[in-house]
Image: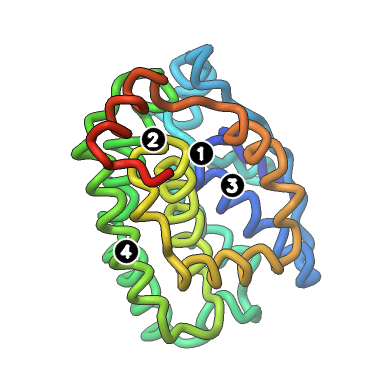
Amino acid sequence: MTIKLYGSNICPLSRAVFHFVKILKADGIEIQLDYCPIDFRKEEQKEEWFREIHPAGKTPAIKDEETKFCLGESRAIFFYLLEKYGKGTKWWPKTVEDQAMMIRSFYANGGLFNIIDSTVCRKVINNKKTPDTAWINVANILQRYDEFYESHEDVTLLDIYIHYLCDFGKLLLMKTGLHNDKCNLPNLAKLHQKVKSLPGFNAVNDSYFNWIRNYRFVSQTEIDKQKQLGTIQE
């Protein structure tokens, strides 16, 4: 059974879905993944063939080669994979009540996606100026999630989802060099280590880390200005 996953290496939720499939395979689930990268800078997401898979032209999106069923939106994709492949695993609760609670938790955390993706990620990918207020919003929500994970133990699928968004937001924030004082997030760092220890992490994230290490998000002029204002801690 083959699932085609259309994603971008710099899209945190594409990588979250990709990683989850790797985890399912490591748990002994028979699922084959064909990863199909989409290049946003070439605007491949706007091409007609991809619009037939995801009319909104967003990643991640999947196509089930067995049924030809296409689906977009990462949370919906998670639930589709769980229902079709994840029954009997620790990732999908056994009772309908617990499943409903899990779904509610996913959608209750939708604001995290909106702040990181809509206000920052898309501007970065398209080389558009990102207002400093957007970076401050990212910093504030990361701090709230860091507080939430102070006493968290077991890693759930929701935690994987949150990790990929928070980690992307943190790395973007650090790369700007504008708010280094807001990047001390010890509990999210512990969550990162837990997710990193899950099967398939390096295979999914290597190209992403190469990209983010070499990408400059703000001009040197802006960095110098922020140094004068004392925003950057050297």
Badge 2 amino acid? Cys
Query: Any mark on residue 15, and which?
Result: 3
Distance between the alpha carbons at the discs numbered 2 and 1? 8 Å
Disc nearer the start of the sequence (3/2)? 3
Dividing the picture into quadrants, the one containing residue 162 is bottom left
Residue 191, image x and y in percent?
53, 70
Question: Which of the pair 36/111 is nearer the observer?
Answer: 111
- Position of residue 206 relative to residue 156, above or below, is above
Q: CB under 8 Å between callouts 2 and 1?
A: yes
Residue at point 70% right, 65% down?
24
Q: Which residue is mark 4?
A: 143
Residue at point 64% right, 49% down?
18
Residue at point 27% right, 41% down?
230
Disc nearer the start of the sequence (4/3)? 3
Distance between the alpha carbons at the discs numbered 1 and 4? 21 Å
Is 5 situated left or right of 13 in this image? right
Badge 4 amino acid? Gln
Mark 4 or mark 3, whichever is nearer to me? 4
Residue 84, image x and y in percent?
60, 63
Q: CB under 8 Å between callouts 3 and 1?
A: yes
Is 85 situated left or right of 137 in this image? right
Quadrant of the image containing the C terminus: top left
Residue at point 28% right, 26% down?
225
Question: Which of the pair 49/126 is nearer the observer?
Answer: 126
Mark 4 nearby-residue class (10 Å; few <14, some 14–19, many ≥20)? many
Query: Any mark on residue 121, and which?
Result: 2
Q: Which residue is mark 1?
A: 11
Disc nearer the start of the sequence (1/4)? 1
Badge 1 amino acid? Cys
Is 84 situated left or right of 71 in this image? right
